[in-house]
């Protein structure tokens, strides 16, 4: 599935949720489904700068794609990580580097997030793209 199609699927899922509180709860629940993140990878050098919460991200190359694992100490951040990884995980470095972050606006989650959380999502995507370089 393309990045654009993945974003469209997430948008449709969120659009079907009746109110902002339920959308927020759904995003938090997505974080509960993240792949386990090893405690030994909770290192300062693996922290994503620019986030209000502690957020760790590690990447590994599997064949010709990058696989990311991440976690945070904040439940909403874990949910946002899950959203971003659903879109960008297991893609080629070229797909990740060429990803147009403006497409994230289509998700319609900006109104659910404080400006600090919005900046954190931007920092996460920047780090994901940096690791794809």
Image (cartoon, rainbow, N blue to C red):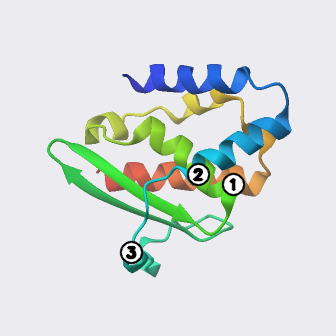
Q: Position of residue 85 (x, y in %)?
A: 46, 44
Residue 10, quarter of picture: top right
* Circle 3 or circle 2, nearest the eye: 2
Can the viewer see residue 122 in this picture?
no
To which residue does mark 3 refer?
A: 41
Judge whether 128 appears above or below 104 on screen: below
Q: Are marks 1 and 2 in contact (CB under 8 Å)?
A: yes
Q: Position of residue 127 (x, y in %)?
A: 44, 56
Residue at 27% from the left image edge and 42% from the top image edge:
93
92 left or right of 76? left
**Distance CA(mark 3)–CA(mark 1):** 20 Å
55 left or right of 65? right
- Residue found at the far left of this picture: 63
To which residue does mark 1 refer?
A: 76
Q: Position of residue 100 (x, y in %)?
A: 48, 32
For the residue carrying disc 1, how many other residues have a C-alpha within 10 Å: few (<14), some (14-19), or many (20+)?
many
Q: Nearer the viewer, residue 132 or 32?
A: 32
Q: Quadrant of the N terminus?
A: top left
Give the secondary structure at mark 2: helix
For the residue carrying disc 2, how many other residues have a C-alpha within 10 Å: few (<14), some (14-19), or many (20+)?
many
Can the viewer see residue 78 in this picture?
yes
88 left or right of 63? right
Residue at 80% from the left image edge and 51% from the top image edge:
114
To which residue does mark 2 refer?
A: 31
Which label's residue is closer to the chain start, 3 or 2? 2
**Distance CA(mark 1)–CA(mark 2):** 7 Å
């Amino acid at each position: 599935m393309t990045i654009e199609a993945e974003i469209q699927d997430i948008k449709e899922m969120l659009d079907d949720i009746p109110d902002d509180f339920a959308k927020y709860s759904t995003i938090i629940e997505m974080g509960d489904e993240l792949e386990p993140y090893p405690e030994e990878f909770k290192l300062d050098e693996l922290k994503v700068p620019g986030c209000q919460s502690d957020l760790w991200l590690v990447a590994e190359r599997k064949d010709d794609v990058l696989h990311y694992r991440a976690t945070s100490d904040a439940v909403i951040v874990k949910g946002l990580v899950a959203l971003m990884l659903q879109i960008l995980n297991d893609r080629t470095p070229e797909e990740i580097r060429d990803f147009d972050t403006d497409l994230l606006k289509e998700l319609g989650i900006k109104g659910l997030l404080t400006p600090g959380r919005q900046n954190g999502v931007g920092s996460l995507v920047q780090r994901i793209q940096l690791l794809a370089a």
